[in-house]
Image (cartoon, rainbow, N blue to C red):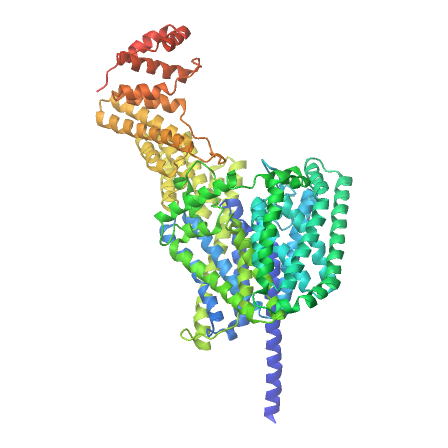
Amino acid sequence: MSNPVYGKQMKTSSKATANSTSMLLWSLSIGLILFLLWSAFQVALFNGQLLQFEAPIYWAVVITTLLFILWVAIYFKRMKLETQQDWLKVAVILLPLTYVLSLINAASEYLANNMILIQSIYAMIFVMTMYLLQNNKINHIIQSSLIGIAYVIVGFGLLNWLGAFNFAGKLVGWFSAGVINGVYNQAIWNDSNGARLASVFQYPNTYAAFLMAFLFISIFSMIRSKRIITQLLHGFMLVPIILSLLLTLSRTGLVMLPIVFVILLLLLKPTKQILWFIYCAVSAIGTLLVLNPINTAGIELQKQFTGSLSAKSWAILIGASLVVALLCWAIQRFVAPMLEAKFQSWSARKASSVWIPLGSVVLTVVIAVLLLGTGVRNILPDSISTRLENINFQQHSVLERITFYKDATKLFADYPVIGAGGGAWTALYEKYQNNPYVSAQAHNFFMQYLVEVGLVGFLVFMAFILYVFYQYVRSYVRRNEEDRESHFVYFILSMSILVLSLLDFNMSYVFIGMLVFLGLGGMSAAIEPQPTRRLKMGEAAARGVYSIIAGIAIIVLLIVSVRFLQANHYAIEGNELARSSQDFRQIKAPLDKDLSIRSTHPDSLMLLASLYQQGYTQTKDEQFYTEAVQLLQRGLEAEPYNKSMVKQLIGIYELKGENDQAYTLRKEYASNYIWDMDWYEQLISRSFDLGYQALGQGDTTKKNAYFSSGIEAYQHVVDGVEHLKTLPKGQLQGQPFQVTPTMILNAGKMRYMSNDLPGATAVLKTGIAEDLTDATNREIARWYLASLKREFKLDEALYHKLIAISSSEADEIKRIAELTFN
């Protein structure tokens, strides 16, 4: 009698376990969806390498780790390492590990650590979604949620474009870090091209990449769906998406869109290819009909909100979207079946999917010629027409990007094996740049990845993503239509963003990176599992090994991310107190707490050092000076290329009168900032001052050393100015870089005092100016005439012009000419 009872109990227990697992599974799925929605409105988790961007990224690490714990609880009993698909969850661990390896050469310990955390987010997202998306129901819900989040972002962007800044800010201000003073910061980006739509990203080009991916996802989902309401929804959103894409004024997006379109067409049957063309054409025409009024209204509403104009614009947009939605539904309902029947035999032929994409390339060329080379583009608003007109290989943004990539190869050549750590480009680009541009991003994800982790890490990454793409496409072509479509959204998502990332820094937004790895996880979920011949591990061993790895990762990530969140809180508190309080101890307390967790965090370290510097200035207490110097020296060990830190240390040395130490530091770091005009002007001035001081002390060796360094620095500037003349016509120089009168005066004096009279004359002559009322210009003329006098020469016109200003100048010229130097 006991057995039936036992059996009944076991059945109940089994059911309870299944329900428990199901609850965990739904909790994980819903948690992931909400996390993605939250992430989008945290400025898309931009890795901006500034204090203000830290906290949301650290919160993202915490949330992802907690979700990963749920995943382990759900899938622990099903963990195995038997197929190629299974081993991908091991392979993805190599991505953050290559960043850990690159810490050896890290140009910035702070930025490198942040990148390790970000890569860990990507690895966990990939593993979780690879398993989650094998469940058909979960797969459908996550796909629908992703599209829904995208539509929310599109609507949010248009709310801002049509003047509803405050309303949009109130909608998300209760949870978004991007809302400042009730308005989402830079949802509309303003630059020399005018207003540009950026939505949650604060950067139009990344928003364009996002829009392009979801434009194609919307078309695919509309064709795939059997439900009328779903078809109408996707059709309705086509106009807002294309409109938003055009309002970004992103040339990169417009250039790359046809490339992505053709790649996607290659994986579709001819009937679907034709439908894609039809829907793109219908939605594009609908967008063009409303583009001018909505573009104009948006620009006016940025300046002055008018309720009637905003309402009218929304009515136009909604009306056009409804018409396009109905047309798309009608096409899908009546035309699509006819096309399917007509092209059924053609679709069965080998390589039938190739011909239409080839034709689309020709069509793209024709459209490009019409838009770029004829007056057809005049149907577009002036802002968009101007952007199209400027698309060519000789315009500034193209030439500048090419320069970035060349400079990245120079950086890579110095760190070829394991790279220079996360954030390497930001830390090092000034050392390698071809001209004085300012760009903390390389504008190419792959080049930026290469310089961060070197050849080892880059090959690991490329092998990983190419393997996933290859296996997905291989599985895709073998499956029937329904199975193919189940995960194609993820292919569109990852491929679109990665292709766009060839020309921009989209992956610097962690939210975008998460979408890419979610897409890779979805593609991996669709790969046909093939048993591995050599790499095989029993279930118990696999569970043990992976659980140990996952357990260690979870513990480390939770501890580090929570501690970094605490540190970030203290750093922000210290910065706020520094603006509102004069109490040294009150400001110092939170900074000390931050540095007790992150001992070389640049923001807190430099702020605390400045407090000590102020203390020394006010009290002359040596302890303050020592503390400031030690702090900055410690910081430079971890952040050797942090310019602000170096300048602060130089300033403290000079404040104390330690001019030799300050000069040594300025000279040592000059090669890291080769286009910083102010740096070289100061270096040349200090070279003269210290050399002149050594001359007065009779120390010829020191004088020669200082003067040689100063003259070398001056020549560096002269050579740089000549180099800038070789830049292509369309490329902007960037920051100012020129030979200043102060540089010329000091360099001329150094040559003169080195008894190099021809050299002094040549240098000083380049600084002769018309305006001799300026003190520096007058002194250059004075020393120039003195140098000529020593060479038994005279510039009579300049001499008379100078003494006309002051008769005492004649005596000054004579006095300088009579000076002798050993």
Up the image or down, 148 lies above or below 636; here it is: below
Q: Nearer the viewer, residue 335 or 199?
A: 335
Q: Nearer the viewer, residue 749 or 55?
A: 749
Q: x and y percent of residue 597 in the render? A: 44, 51
Residue 724: image quadrant is top left
Quadrant into which the N terminus falls = bottom right
Task: Name the side, left or right, on which 38 lies relative to 637.
Answer: right
Q: Position of residue 821 (x, y in %)?
A: 23, 18
Q: Is residue 782 left or right of residue 518?
A: left
Q: Position of residue 218 (x, y in %)?
A: 65, 58
Quadrant in the rendering for residue 609: top left
Determine if residue 216 is in view.
yes
631 left or right, relative to 583: left
Quarter of the view holding residue 333: bottom right
Does residue 639 lie above or below 150 as drawn?
above
The residue lying at 37 percent from left, 54 percent from top is 418
Image quarter where the C terminus lies is: top left
Q: What is the count of numbered marks? A: 0
Q: Residue at x 62, y 82 (%)?
A: 12
Q: Position of residue 670 (x, y in %)?
A: 36, 35
The reply to whether residue 266 is in sight is no
Q: Nearer the viewer, residue 576 or 585?
A: 576
